[in-house]
Image (cartoon, grey):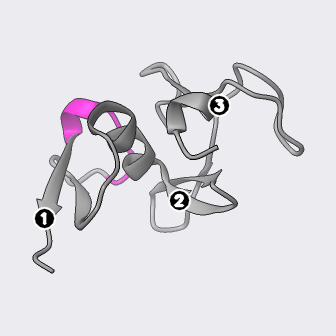
Amino acid sequence: MSNPADCFEYDENSPSCLRWKIKRKGTRGIGSVAGTKTKRGHWAVSFRGQPEMAARVVWEMFHGEIPNGVVFHVDGDLSNTKIENLCLDSIEP
């Protein structure tokens, strides 16, 4: 699954702003909070077979694939993955 909306539901009541839409091994099931908080304070999820920052997944759900760029947290709070707190800083190729 390459589209995050196939795996996740955006929910600002979830600490990561993501909930599982599918049943996966190692999760509590559909509707459970998706992700793990890292030591640095980011939320990370398993997506496309590898760890991914929840902020990137949320950004992609609303704006599409991120070809070149870094998603950053406007308020500096790395655990705040609400869409209005995320901004894309483009990187020139």
Q: Main secondary structure of the magenta part?
A: loop
Separation of marks 3 and 2 at Cα, in angstroms:
15 Å
- Which of the marked residues, 1 or 3, is nearer the chain's N terminus? 3
Q: Is residue 80 magenta?
A: yes
Q: Which residue is mark 3?
A: 33
Q: Is residue 53 left or right of residue 92?
A: right
Q: Is residue 78 above or below residue 14?
A: below
Residue at figure coordinates x 63%, y 33% from the top left: 7
Q: Quadrant of residue 80?
A: top left
The answer to whether residue 15 of the structure is visible from this angle is no
Q: Give the magenta-colored segment's residue range.
A: 78-85
Residue at figure coordinates x 82%, y 26% from the top left: 29
- Which of the marked residues, 3 or 2, is nearer the chain's N terminus? 3
Separation of marks 1 and 2 at Cα, in angstroms:
18 Å
Separation of marks 1 and 3 at Cα, in angstroms:
29 Å
Q: Hey, which residue is sitting farthest bottom in the picture? A: 93
Quadrant location, the C terminus: bottom left
Q: Residues within 10 Å of mark 3 (few under 14, many from 20)?
A: many
Give the number of the disc on residue 90.
1
Q: Secondary structure at mark 3?
A: loop
Q: Which residue is mark 2?
A: 52
